[in-house]
Image (spheres, rainbow, N blue to C red):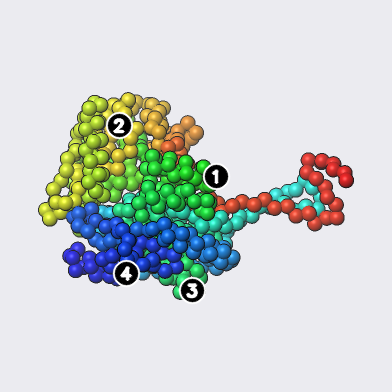
């Protein structure tokens, strides 16, 4: 994409050289404020600037959010669903443009960038149906002439803090559901993906406000150690949804727990794929490759450990090396490129450190392990995807490195494979490749994968929005997106109605006055 094409794309998305990073029904003035510069990982060049929120901006956002919640939560849920439907329709119009912006700002291939916008559209469609299905239970009462039931009520303004690797989809997972159930959303995006956030907020709120409703999506750009602290410590926000690292997630969790608030935590993943000697090797190779290389290994669901049955170990590793050697590395805006850049220098340093530690601990690099120079893109951090034969007990196996590094381990029995699989502190996504029914069922049983997501004959990466997304152990235990994850954004109320002319008490208690 030429400089002129890029400038034209930004202009169509309403982006200038300097943009306001605070929205509270209107864009906060940009004068005299600190800015964050967004740099494209493709070539290291600046794309644009976004202003950071001041404390005054923060209070403006909070006040506007509280006022909007009072109005929005009173709108019938099916009508809220129709607003979300129109948001989804509008996102369809912007799919290609937003997808390219995602690619430019975080280095995804255009296919993946557009796929991320499609996730926003899909969750909008899901939320429309949900708007007529916010069901509560009717419960049999032990007391005569009593009705006992439960209902779900909007929670309030909620905070959503997202990571760079999915700069808009994860926000939509939370926000489309939250908006449908009657909440409003305050978004603190990653400092590495501020332009995407700015463009999305402009698009979605225009639809909402043109329909005569108050703004329901708010934006606060700023540093995590400042704006993130404000959000997580604020009692006015009953729920904080955070996607990011385990250490930062702990900090967020502590802040929210101190005020007895709620969290949805989507933290580290250290995902493994088991390939048995009964697998369809072609499916397994494709699934492992996609899981390990998609988004240049910068997904929370990336396959980071490959657990191979000893009978297929050598042939699988050799075939995998051949696939890695053919994978095209380069500008993700170009057709045919599979592996784009790492997000920045810090990510590259993490890649280097992980390989160094792995080799010191006894690991053997069998492919990759080095930086790649792309003509004209020398400022970008491009690397060869890396295969490391590993041994049990290596400390690096417990660490999530956001880079295309795949550790390969060998096992004999399925029980041993599961033990290796479950040995790490994280528990997000998992996969097994096998045609054996017993191996499948064992993997999916309580003795099998300890992750929140378990896949059979498909990749650890690429979750659908219809299922609840999230993990166990240090991954945080939260759930977003589909299934009944909507309940996290509401409060449950158990209601009892006495329609008789007596006051019978529960458990047969007698109380005479």
Instruction: Give residue 391's quadrant in the image.
Output: top left
Mark 3–mark 2 contact, CB under 8 Å? Answer: no
Q: Quadrant of the N terminus?
A: bottom left
Give the CA separation, mark 1 to mark 4. 39 Å
**Percent position of residue 99, x then y:** 31, 61
> Residue at the spot x=16%, y=43% of the render?
371
> Residue at the spot x=39%, y=62% of the render?
22
Mark 2–mark 4 contact, CB under 8 Å? Answer: no
Q: Which residue is mark 4?
A: 14
Give the CA separation, mark 2 to mark 4. 44 Å
Dot 1, crowdedness within 10 Å: few (<14), some or many (≥20)? few
Give the CA separation, mark 4 to mark 3. 20 Å
Mark 1–mark 4 contact, CB under 8 Å? Answer: no
**Percent position of residue 315, x then y:** 24, 34
Left/right of residue 63 with respect to residue 162 in the rendered view: right
Give the CA separation, mark 3 to mark 2. 53 Å
Q: Which residue is mark 2?
A: 396
Residue 25 to residue 459: above or below: below
Kindly state the secondary structure of the residue where label 1 is placed: loop
> Residue at the spot x=28%, y=70% of the render?
11
Kindly state the secondary structure of the residue where label 4 is placed: loop
Identify the residue at the far left of this view. 375
Tell me which label, 4 or 3, sits earlier in the chain.
4
Residue 200 to residue 255: above or below: below
Instruction: Give residue 58's quadrant in the image.
Output: bottom left
Q: Which residue is mark 1?
A: 260
């Amino acid at each position: 994409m030429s400089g002129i094409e890029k400038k034209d794309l930004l202009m169509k998305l309403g982006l200038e050289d300097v943009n306001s990073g605070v929205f509270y029904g209107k864009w906060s003035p940009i004068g005299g404020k600190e800015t964050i510069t967004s740099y494209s990982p493709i070539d290291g060049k600046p794309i644009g600037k976004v202003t950071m929120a001041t404390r005054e901006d923060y209070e403006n956002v909070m006040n506007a959010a509280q006022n909007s919640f009072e109005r929005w939560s009173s709108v019938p849920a099916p009508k809220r669903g129709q607003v979300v439907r129109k948001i989804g329709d509008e996102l369809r119009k912007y799919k290609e443009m937003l997808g390219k912006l995602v690619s430019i700002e975080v280095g995804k291939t255009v296919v993946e960038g557009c796929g991320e916008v499609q996730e926003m559209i899909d969750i909008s469609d899901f939320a429309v149906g949900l708007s007529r299905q916010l069901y509560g239970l009717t419960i049999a009462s032990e007391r005569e002439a009593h009705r006992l039931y439960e209902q779900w009520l909007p929670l309030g303004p909620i905070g959503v803090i997202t990571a760079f690797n999915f700069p808009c989809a994860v926000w939509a997972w939370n926000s489309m559901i939250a908006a449908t159930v009657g909440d409003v959303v305050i978004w603190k995006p990653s400092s590495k993906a501020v332009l995407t956030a700015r463009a999305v907020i402009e698009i979605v709120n225009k639809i909402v406000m043109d329909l005569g409703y108050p703004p329901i999506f708010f934006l606060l750009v700023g540093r995590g150690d400042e704006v993130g602290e404000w959000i997580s410590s604020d009692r006015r926000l009953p729920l904080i949804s955070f996607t990011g690292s385990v250490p930062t997630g702990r900090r967020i969790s502590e802040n929210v727990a101190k005020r007895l608030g709620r969290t949805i935590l989507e933290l580290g993943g250290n995902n493994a794929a088991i390939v048995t000697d009964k697998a369809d090797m072609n499916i397994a190779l494709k699934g492992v490759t996609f899981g390990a290389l998609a988004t240049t290994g910068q997904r929370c669901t990336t396959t980071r450990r490959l657990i191979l049955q000893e009978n297929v170990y050598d042939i699988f590793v050799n075939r995998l090396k051949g696939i890695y050697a053919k994978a095209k590395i380069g500008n993700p805006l170009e057709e045919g490129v599979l592996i784009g850049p790492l997000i920045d220098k810090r990510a590259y340093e993490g890649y280097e450190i992980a390989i160094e530690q792995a080799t010191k601990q006894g690991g053997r690099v069998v492919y990759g392990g080095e930086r790649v120079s792309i003509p004209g893109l020398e400022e970008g951090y491009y690397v060869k995807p890396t295969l490391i034969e590993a041994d049990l007990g290596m400390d690096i196996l417990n660490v999530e490195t956001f880079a295309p590094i795949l550790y390969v381990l060998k096992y004999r029995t399925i029980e041993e494979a599961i033990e290796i699989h479950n040995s790490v502190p994280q528990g997000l996504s998992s996969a097994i490749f096998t045609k054996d029914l017993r191996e499948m069922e064992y993997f999916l049983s309580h003795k099998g994968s300890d992750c929140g997501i378990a896949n059979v004959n498909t990749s650890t990466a690429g979750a659908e929005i219809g299922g609840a997304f999230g993990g166990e152990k240090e991954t945080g235990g939260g759930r977003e997106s589909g299934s009944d994850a909507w309940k996290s954004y509401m409060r449950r109320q158990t209601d009892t109605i006495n329609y008789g002319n007596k006051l019978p008490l529960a458990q047969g208690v007698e109380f005479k006055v």
